Image: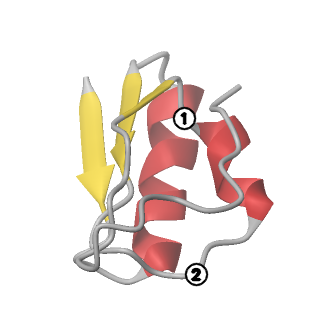
Amino acid sequence: MFVTQLEQPIPAARRGFELARKHGVTTVFNPAPALPLTDDIYPLCEHHAERNGSDGAGRRGHRPCR
């Protein structure tokens, strides 16, 4: 299982997803801390944790994983 979040650079999370999928590893995404994201990262993950911003506003523009 590969689990990642956004405390490292977004390209590192994206690359981790790509490698995990290549090797058939289950992927989990916790998109925190709240950062602006492009939609292209969500198809790379299988499961995600709901995101709440530090302001409690929650995630805007939610796109489900695959």
As helix, strand or loop, the secondary structure at mark 2 comes to: loop
Taking 32 as reference, is 34 left or right? right
The residue wearing badge 2 is: 36
Three-letter amino acid code at disc 2? Pro
Taking 49 as reference, is 60 left or right? right
Q: Nearer the viewer, mark 2 or mark 1?
A: 2
Q: Position of residue 37 (x, y in %)?
A: 62, 73
Three-letter amino acid code at disc 1? Cys
The colouring scheme, among rainbow, by chain, secondary structure or one colour, is secondary structure
Q: Position of residue 8 (x, y in %)?
A: 27, 79
Taking 37 as reference, is 51 left or right? left
Who comes first in sequence, dot 2 or dot 1?
Answer: 2
| Quarter in which the C terminus is drawn | top right
Mark 2 neighbour density, 10 Å: few (under 14) some (14–19) many (20 or more): few
Residue at image location 28% in from the left, 79% down from the top: 55
Alpha-carbon span between mark 2 and mark 1:
17 Å
Position above or below: 26 against 29: above
Taking 21 as reference, is 33 left or right? left
Residue 30: mark: none
Mark 1 neighbour density, 10 Å: few (under 14) some (14–19) many (20 or more): many
The residue wearing badge 1 is: 45
Between 60 and 37, which is closer to the camera in this rendering? 60
Q: Position of residue 22 (x, y in %)?
A: 58, 30
Q: Position of residue 51 (x, y in %)?
A: 37, 53
Residue at image location 54% in from the left, 35% down from the top: 45
| Quarter in which the N terminus is drawn | top left
Query: What number of labels is visible?
Result: 2
As helix, strand or loop, the secondary structure at mark 1 comes to: loop
Hey, which quadrant is residue 57 in on the image?
Answer: bottom left
Position above or below: 18 against 56: above
Between 11 and 36, which is closer to the camera in this rendering? 36
Hey, which quadrant is residue 20 in on the image?
Answer: top left
